[in-house]
Amino acid sequence: MERLKGRRALVTGAASGIGRASALRLASEGAAVFCADIAAQGAAQTAKEIEAAGGVAACGSVDVSDFASCQSIVAAAVEALDGLDTLCNIAGILRPGHTTEIDMGVWDQTVAINLSGTFYMCRAALPTLLEGGGAIVNMASAAALQGVPYNAAYCASKAGVVGLTQSLAAEYARRGVRVNCICPGGVQTPMTAKGLPVENMDPALMARIVPLMPRVAQPEEIAALVAYLASDESGYMTGTAVKIDGGQVA
Ligand SMILES: NC(=O)c1ccc[n+]([C@@H]2O[C@H](COP(=O)([O-])OP(=O)(O)OC[C@H]3O[C@@H](n4cnc5c(N)ncnc54)[C@H](O)[C@@H]3O)[C@@H](O)[C@H]2O)c1
């Protein structure tokens, strides 16, 4: 498939899980991909895999919670790829805990990376995306649409990503930039490898986040949706929050 031939994509969170799978998928469909992550080695590894498969890749380190860092990585991507038309904001963290025990630092960091980080990357990349049109794909979560216990900061940050996506879509639809977000349920990645490590959880409260399908998703299944939303096949979609959750959210 060469749906993304000629596209130049910047992917955050590209060292691991969904971001890594998305970078590989975009490249396999013909895009040149800049792999960015706070874990520089992991991003480099993903870029190396893309090149080994015959694709075009570059990489760099970014802390999405720092606007100056976002500006630098966008500049680096524009230089390495000779422009930019696709931005996939996939970096994120999950720090669950009982709300009454949660440290304010956990709230601040979760919002800084998941929500401010997504905004900072959009803010840094939009001037370039507006030059020739493009697509932004943000990673929200089913947790944005459904209260998940022990995850107040995460749910709030991801609901913010949905609102941010809708606002940017409204502002830039007529100028050729589409903005969509994805709401996955459980996905098998390092983020979820240990389950939700919260002591004294009430399992009854977790019953509402069980999917209809008796399994979690693989990162490649989410990456396929990232590639679709980045491509012209989704050309009439903007401002959407697409659930991909095995039927978790009613
Ligand atoms: N795994 C799931 O079940 C699931 C479900 C819904 C949504 N999501 C979302 O999907 C995205 C990817 O999650 P994943 O499951 O692949 O997790 P992951 O932990 O495997 O990957 C997250 C990546 O983000 C990077 N990152 C963290 N902080 C960063 C920062 N400040 N700057 C730049 N990069 C940073 C990490 O280094 C890591 O490579 C996240 O936004 C997550 O919230 C995951």
Image (tube, rainbow, N blue to C red):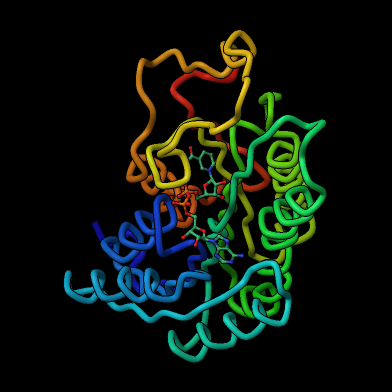
Q: Position of residue 170 (x, y in %)?
A: 77, 52
Compared with 53, 128 (above or below) is below
> Is 191 in front, or is 3?
191
Compared with 43, 83 (above or below) is below
Q: Residue at x 26, y 62 (%)?
A: 28
> Is 172 in front, or is 81?
81
> Is 164 in front, or is 135?
164
Q: Residue at x 46, y 39 (%)?
A: 192
Image check: 157 left or right of 16? right
Q: Residue at x 56, y 19 (%)?
A: 209
Compared with 219, 12 (above or below) is below
Q: Position of residue 54 (x, y in %)?
A: 18, 74
Q: Residue at x 65, y 75 (%)?
A: 125
- Quadrant of the image occupied by residue 55: bottom left
Quadrant location, the N terminus: bottom left
Q: Position of residue 98 (x, y in %)?
A: 72, 30
Q: Position of residue 142 (x, y in %)?
A: 59, 31
Image check: 36 left or right of 20? right
- Quadrant of the image occupied by residue 216: top left
